[in-house]
């Protein structure tokens, strides 16, 4: 095939360019060589590298020497302890990280499986494996400077778990190596293996091979079969991914990989490996949770916050022996737990599906979570938490956030008259209706809020401006989706969100009204201290956000008090207490007979904010609530308040209810009118008497004057 003229031209030009540039390149290379030899650059580079290596080695040796590895075994047995709002011990994430057993009480199958998989030259090296390091170095180069694993011995892994972070960095690998050498000087191989097996993580909150054997196979570590031992060893690579409870197929695949390694290393005959690979696993969970984990939902949430807010790993929090200080109030938590023991409050579905609920109690001044209830199903370690993780439609508890706060800020008053009648809005003729289909034409604002008038809320949002209401909701910390396809429509007034909210988010928003217009975001942890006493997380002075003025917050509270005194929650007002708050619910859309998908109640005093949600997860035609919030979630909320409020300081509100304020103003007007009339009557009476006396005096003076005149005339 002939070359195109264009390509021929390019080649010719490149050849001309090369002939021109070649002499210059040769001269440059010759000068570089003379300079390199003259100033011994190779030697200088080598000397700098040696110096850097010496400094780094000295530093790493110093770290290893000061790590005090002689206390390693005792240090690994320390527990992470949770402290409550009074700095009193509330429990441990586990009473110990694992049931510690001696190496004699661990089956040889586990020992051989782990050594074959993690460090087959364990008994031959002195803490580090040159062959493994070389393999890791090749991987480091191939993967562009990223550590991809390999090279770490069991001793190094023990050092990493005990002293270092889990970051895959070159410096951390060097630290591992020096620490491993020091560990090997102090402990025997069996002691090192014993510590490693007793303090490795195996998923589902389980540490150590003894508890792992109980959790997954219902037996002691000394009694495990080779198949079970290989499964346990396989979990070390990724406990979450390879434990047989959560990922059975992946666990089987990983087990088979471990067995293949044992066959390749001639630890187990290949025939036996093939026979075991053809079998499955019989799972038996005989592991009993530790007594120290006494507030499961709360401790789960603490662990999640440590991970997602403070960047710690689950393994670190459970394994490092931290002191975690929280806002937990144990009296409140026990009272909330007791409230949920009243099963008659929950009407489960006919097929037995559990009616779920989540609740959270906050300190309005700080946002610290006093107590939570995460769900009615049997607790699983770090399972789904309906207090913090559920995302549901808020219904009418959105009205104070989206409508009434902004209206007060714009100059409306608690007794401003609002329209209460069905009105169609926009091109799509959006027409909200009241839940009872009753309309009064016009109602004062405080009554519209107390009775949760849908028509009035939407009308008012339209009057104050949808954009203003949208922005105000976001100021309350509720995430919204912009645009007409999101939350930018008048249904925002009624809580029709595209995503929804959690009880924790709504409780945080309502702290604004209980805390003079300042919102405190909900959180669990106030401080984390490591085993050395160093503070690694400090939230003792959490950030706050001013959402509205103290005056508007008091006005909102005065109106929200009416919800419990004479509004939608009047039947759920805690006996003997004065609280403010709001109810809400969302209706089903799949039938004309009624029913609700979500029910909410939020209530607060100056001392506490409680938000409670109830509903089926998921909701469908077979699983929905036939009641409204006043007979569904309401009674549960009432019991919670009555159980918890006696433990609070019972601080009074700075305001009275809106109805009382308006009644007092009307009475003052009446009294003022009566007073003015009395003054007028008195003045009139006095005026009459003065006139009467004046006339008499005038007559007497006239008579005297006439008499005097007659005498003069005579």
Image (cartoon, rainbow, N blue to C red):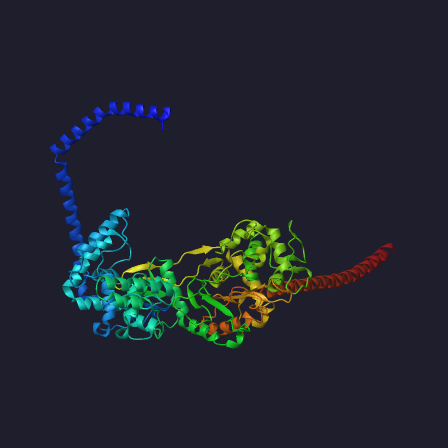
In the rendered view of the protein, which quadrant contains the N terminus?
top left
Q: Is residue 607 visible?
A: no
Q: Is residue 518 above or below residue 376?
A: above
Q: Position of residue 490 (x, y in %)?
A: 60, 53
Q: How many marks?
A: 0
**Frontmost residue, 279 versus 351:** 279
**Frontmost residue, 107 versus 259:** 259
Task: List the single residue furthest toward the right.
Answer: 714
Q: Position of residue 66 (x, y in %)?
A: 18, 59
* Quarter of the rendering containing residue 38: top left
**Frontmost residue, 105 versus 654:** 105
In the rendered view of the protein, which quadrant contains the C terminus?
bottom right
Q: Is residue 712 left or right of residue 294?
A: right
Q: Position of residue 511 (x, y in %)?
A: 48, 61
Q: Is residue 428 left or right of residue 147?
A: right
Say which residue appears at 26% left-offset and 25% top-offset: 18
Say which residue appears at 34% left-offset and 62% top-offset: 253
**Frontmost residue, 481 versus 285:** 285
Q: Position of residue 90 (x, y in %)?
A: 35, 71
Q: Is residue 111 visible?
A: yes
Task: List the single residue furthest toward the front.
Answer: 1
Q: Is residue 513 above or below residue 462?
A: below
* Quarter of the rendering containing residue 317: bottom left
């Amino acid at each position: 095939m002939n070359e195109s003229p264009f390509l021929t031209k390019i080649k010719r030009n490149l050849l001309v360019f090369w002939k021109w540039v070649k002499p210059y390149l040769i001269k440059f290379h010759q000068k570089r060589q003379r300079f390199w030899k003259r100033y011994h650059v190779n030697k200088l580079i080598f000397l700098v590298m040696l110096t850097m290596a010496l400094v780094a080695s000295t530093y790493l040796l110093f770290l290893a020497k000061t790590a005090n590895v002689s206390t390693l075994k005792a240090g690994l047995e320390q527990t992470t302890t949770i402290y409550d709002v009074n700095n009193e011990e509330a429990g441990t994430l586990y009473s110990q990280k694992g049931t510690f057993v001696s190496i004699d009480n661990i089956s040889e199958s586990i020992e051989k499986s782990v050594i074959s998989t993690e460090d087959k030259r364990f008994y031959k090296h002195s803490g580090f494996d040159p062959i493994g390091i070389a393999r890791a170095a090749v991987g480091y180069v191939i993967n562009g400077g990223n550590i991809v694993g390999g090279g770490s011995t069991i001793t190094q892994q023990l050092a990493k778990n005990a002293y270092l972070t889990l970051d895959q960095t070159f410096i951390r690998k060097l630290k591992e190596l020096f620490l491993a050498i020091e560990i090997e000087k102090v402990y025997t191989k069996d002691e090192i293996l014993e510590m490693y097996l007793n303090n490795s993580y195996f998923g589902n909150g389980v540490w150590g091979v003894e508890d792992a054997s109980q959790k997954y196979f219902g037996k002691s570590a000394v009694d495990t079969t080779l198949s079970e031992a290989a499964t346990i060893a396989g979990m070390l690579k990724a406990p979450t991914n390879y434990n047989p409870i959560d990922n059975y197929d992946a666990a089987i695949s990983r087990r088979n990989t471990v067995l293949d390694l044992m066959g390749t290393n001639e630890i187990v005959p290949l025939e036996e490996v093939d026979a075991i690979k053809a079998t499955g696993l019989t799972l038996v969970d005989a592991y009993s949770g530790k007594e120290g984990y006494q507030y499961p939902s709360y401790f789960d949430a603490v662990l999640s916050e440590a991970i997602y807010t403070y960047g710690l790993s689950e393994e670190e929090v459970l394994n490092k022996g931290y002191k975690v200080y929280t806002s937990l109030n144990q009296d409140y938590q026990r009272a909330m737990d007791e409230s949920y023991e009243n099963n008659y409050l929950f009407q489960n579905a006919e097929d037995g599906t559990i009616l779920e609920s989540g609740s959270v109690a906050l300190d309005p001044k700080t946002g610290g979570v006093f107590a939570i209830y995460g769900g009615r199903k049997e607790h699983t370690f770090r399972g789904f938490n309906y207090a913090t993780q559920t995302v549901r439609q808020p219904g009418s508890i959105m009205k104070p956030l989206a409508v009434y706060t902004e209206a007060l800020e714009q100059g409306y008053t608690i007794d401003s008259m609002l329209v209460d009648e069905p009105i169609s809005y926009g091109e799509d003729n959006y027409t909200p209706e009241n839940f009872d289909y009753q309309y009064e034409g016009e109602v004062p604002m405080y009554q519209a809020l107390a009775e949760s008038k849908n028509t009035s809320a939407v009308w008012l949002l339209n009057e104050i401006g949808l954009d203003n209401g949208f922005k105000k909701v976001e100021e309350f910390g509720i995430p919204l989706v912009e645009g007409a396809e999101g939350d930018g429509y008048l249904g925002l007034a009624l809580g029709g969100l595209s995503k929804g909210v959690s009880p924790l988010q709504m409780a945080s928003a309502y702290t604004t009204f209980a805390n003079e217009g300042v919102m405190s975001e909900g959180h669990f942890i106030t401080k984390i201290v490591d085993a050395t006493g160093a503070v690694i997380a400090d939230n003792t002075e959490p950030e706050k956000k001013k959402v509205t003025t103290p005056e508007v917050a008091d006005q909102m509270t005065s109106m929200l008090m009416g919800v419990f005194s004479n509004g939608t929650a009047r039947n759920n007002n805690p006996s003997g207490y004065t609280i403010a708050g709001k109810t809400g619910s969302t209706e089903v859309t799949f039938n004309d007979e009624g029913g609700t998908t979500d029910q909410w109640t939020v209530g607060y005093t100056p001392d506490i904010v409680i938000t409670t949600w109830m509903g089926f997860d998921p909701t469908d035609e077979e699983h929905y609530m036939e009641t409204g919030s006043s007979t569904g979630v309401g009674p549960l909320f009432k019991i919670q308040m009555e159980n918890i409020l006696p433990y609070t300081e019972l601080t009074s509100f700075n305001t009275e209810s809106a109805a009382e304020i308006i009644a007092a103003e009307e009475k003052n007007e009446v009294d003022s009118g009566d007073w003015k009339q009395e003054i007028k009557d008195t003045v009139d009476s006095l005026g009459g008497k003065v006139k009467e006396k004046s006339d008499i005096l005038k007559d007497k003076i006239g008579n005297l004057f006439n008499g005097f005149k007659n005498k003069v005339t005579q």
